[in-house]
Image (spheres, rainbow, N blue to C red):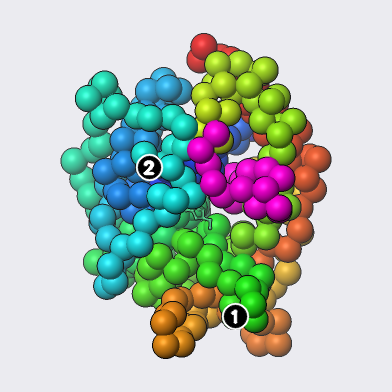
């Protein structure tokens, strides 16, 4: 089967790392570029973690560096959830990395790939949307070369009545506004799916038992604090976004209208995505998924990493 060309915007990140493993070994995607954004940690951590994964998987996917901050607000990194280095219990020593990021900036590298591609290609965004917004501002015609943006972001969950903050949106809401205004077809994989599909302790034991890669990922989970569902397991937000592209029939979607709004009160001000179903739709919103099929596919893909061991 012909592989689908994609660009991935990522801020590795434990669940990003799992999404990258899945995207590489699922055999349906041809990753043209990993565009690194700040978010789960400072951009230097995210770049080192992406390069570490390329060496671990013996792949030469180009890694391009994006802006190290949101468009116009100070960065508030998610190091609490992802661990100091960004990969939970796995510490990457930058001095031991042999691979380097490409010279071109993320926005220039993305634009070049999009412009030279024979057909429109999807961007998978599993991080803040800063690099995409930067490219749309610098190269307004870039929107004509993107088939859709599948993004992990947003949630309809509420916390004590106020709209629940989701990190990829609240880290850089101004970028989200620019991307939504572009009119590019959007697919939203909200936080609820990563919670539905969480990996429980047995799943993590199975990672360990599968192979060396599984043991490395189990080590990532050790310090990964994005445990939800009552601390029953590890949320896998970003993987669900890749899974949508490889198994769209396993994720239920509804057509909705999404817009970026700001929640403001005296000591709180953040951007969030408001989803409604009574206006002209502008987004396909994922609302449910087949968890057993997802986990079956995830472990099958983990076993495929044996080919590089
Ligand atoms: O809210 C979850 C998102 O924030 C995921 O992409 C995770 O990696 C963090 O970036
Ligand atoms: Ca992420």
What percent of the width, then of the height, locates residue 272? 51, 75
Q: State if disc 2 and disc 1 touch (CB < 8 Å).
A: no
First of labels 1, 2 by sequence position: 2
Placement of 16 over or under 176, stated as above or below: above
Whether residue 206 appears in magenta in the rendering, the answer is: no
**Alpha carbons under labels 1 and 2: distance apart:** 29 Å
Q: Which residue is mark 1?
A: 162
In the rendering, at what x and y percent does residue 204 appear?
66, 30
Residue appearing at x 31%, y 41% in the figure: 45
- Is 129 in front, or is 148? 129
Residue 258 image point, x, y percent: 58, 77
Relative placement, left or right, of 137 versus 272 is left
Tag 2 secondary structure: loop
Residue at 71%, 53% (x, y): give it: 229
Answer yes or no: is residue 189 visible: yes
Check disc 2 and report the residue beneath it.
Answer: 84
Residue 232 counted in the magenta span: yes
Q: For this view, does 264 lie left or right of residue 134?
A: right
Q: Quadrant of the N terminus?
A: top right
Residue 304 can be seen, yes or no: no
The residue stretch that appears in magenta: 222-245
Percent position (x, y) of residue 55? Answer: 37, 23
Label 1 sits on a secondary structure element that is: strand
């Amino acid at each position: 089967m012909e592989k689908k060309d994609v660009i991935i915007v990522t801020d590795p990140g434990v669940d990003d790392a799992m999404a990258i493993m899945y995207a590489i070994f699922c055999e349906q995607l041809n990753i043209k570029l990993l565009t690194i954004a700040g978010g789960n940690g400072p951009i230097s951590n995210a770049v080192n973690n992406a390069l570490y994964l390329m060496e671990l998987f013996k792949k030469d996917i180009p890694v391009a560096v994006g802006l190290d901050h949101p468009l116009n607000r100070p960065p508030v990194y998610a190091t609490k959830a992802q661990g100091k280095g960004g990969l939970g219990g796995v510490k990457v020593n930058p001095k031991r990395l042999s691979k380097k990021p490409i010279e071109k900036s993320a926005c220039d590298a993305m634009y070049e790939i999009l412009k030279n591609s024979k057909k429109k290609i999807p961007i998978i965004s599993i991080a803040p949307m800063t690099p995409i917004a930067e490219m749309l501002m610098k190269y307004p015609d870039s929107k004509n070369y993107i088939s859709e943006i599948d993004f992990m972001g947003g949630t309809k969950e509420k916390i004590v009545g106020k709209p629940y903050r989701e990190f990829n949106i609240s880290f850089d809401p101004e970028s989200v506004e620019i991307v939504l205004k572009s009119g590019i077809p959007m697919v939203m994989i909200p936080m609820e799916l990563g919670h539905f599909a969480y990996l429980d302790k047995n799943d993590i034991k199975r990672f360990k038992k599968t192979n060396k890669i599984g043991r490395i990922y189990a080590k990532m989970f050790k310090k990964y604090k994005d445990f939800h569902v009552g601390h029953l397991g590890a949320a896998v937000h970003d993987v669900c976004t890749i899974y949508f592209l490889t198994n769209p029939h396993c994720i239920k979607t509804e057509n909705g209208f999404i817009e970026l709004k700001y929640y403001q009160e005296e000591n709180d001000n953040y951007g969030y995505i408001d989803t409604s179903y009574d206006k002209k739709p502008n987004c396909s919103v994922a609302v449910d998924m087949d968890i057993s099929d997802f986990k079956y596919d995830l472990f099958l893909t983990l076993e495929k990493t044996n080919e590089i061991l």
